[in-house]
Image: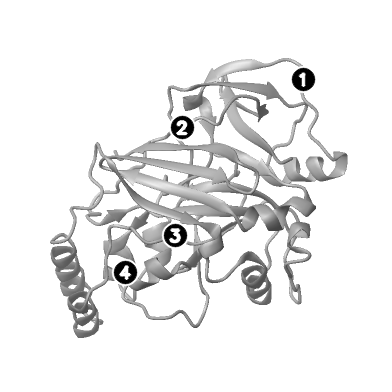
Amino acid sequence: MPISVVRYKVDGEARWGRLVSTGPTRPDDLVTVEPLVSSAPTTAALLAEYDAKGDLPGSGATVSLAASGITSPVTRDATIICQGLNYNDHAAESGHGARKANLLFSKASSSLNGPYDDIIRPDGVELLDYEAEIGIVLRKALTAGTLVSEADVGDYVGAVVLCNDVSARDVMFGASFLQWFQGKSYRTFCPAGPGLYLLKPEEVASVLGNLGFTLDYRGSTRQSANSAQQIYKAPETLTQIAALLDLKPGDLVLTGTPGGVLAQGSPTLARIMAANLFDDAIRRAELVAESKKVDPFLQPGDTLTLRLRDEANGVDLGGQFSRIA
């Protein structure tokens, strides 16, 4: 069976532990972990230990801690590559027709954030949005010529993790020539965790094909999907990434968000983009004004609740609780 590992801090020092209790969902939840006999400084090093030993030996004792002490189980040495518009309902709400190509972009690793830490809305950002996503963490490098199939995807994927690809829509679409990297990469814009769900190679394909996840906002479920609904699955996506750039063990691929985000495409927004492509100030001002007619977007004090479940094995993997600050 897969195992859930958390990364937590004691007196400012990060440690790894096997999650013994149910996956937490809020910062004040008490969780029980078995500290690992590991000095791995990075996620990549932990995955290497797991593969070398076939397991992660524990200390034999358990400790209880508040979930608020859990930090991102993906360490900041990771490169983050993201998929966009990878669910049909999100592509439709964004104003796109049938997808004919995989959309890839990057996100700064300094955006990684704990699952219960605040998401900081930067000064000047008005269209702050959420994107619940499944993250896959590599156990093996992707290099030029790598071809990944359904049969060997477990050789390349070592773990999955719940993520929130927080997005500043006014920066993405209002800055000069559409600054997706900038709009996705502010610090705190990638809450990850709580657990790193470690998988044996033979477990990967079935788990990746049946992960359910949700996001709740303002008292209702805004996003709900299963990984089986993805348009471009992991083998095809990893093969495409390998043809473009190198990724190393421990790197993170975000596999796209389903429908239900705050930003909704419309003919009016499309006209604004087209008419003001070379006038950043007017384009941004009109985008903000038109977008706010539909939803006020994330405001300080708002909260987001995300959940992840391994439907293949019937395991609740816990979730995130983030406050906008």
Mark 2 element type: loop
Mark 4 element type: helix
Mark 4 or mark 1: whose residue is earlier in sequence: 1
Q: Counting other residues with Cα less than 10 Å from the Cα at mark 2, is it few (<14), some (14-19), or many (20 or more)? A: many
Locate the C terminus by quadrant: top left
Q: Is residue 251 visible?
A: no
Report whether 108 appears left or right of 286.
right
Q: Are marks 3 and 2 in contact (CB under 8 Å)?
A: no
Q: Amino acid at mark 2?
A: Thr
Q: Are marks 3 and 4 in contact (CB under 8 Å)?
A: no
- The residue tagged 2 is 25
Q: Are marks 1 and 3 in contact (CB under 8 Å)?
A: no
Q: Are marks 4 and 1 in contact (CB under 8 Å)?
A: no
- Residue 59: give its label: 1
Q: Counting other residues with Cα less than 10 Å from the Cα at mark 4, is it few (<14), some (14-19), or many (20 or more)? A: some
Mark 3 or mark 2: whose residue is earlier in sequence: 2
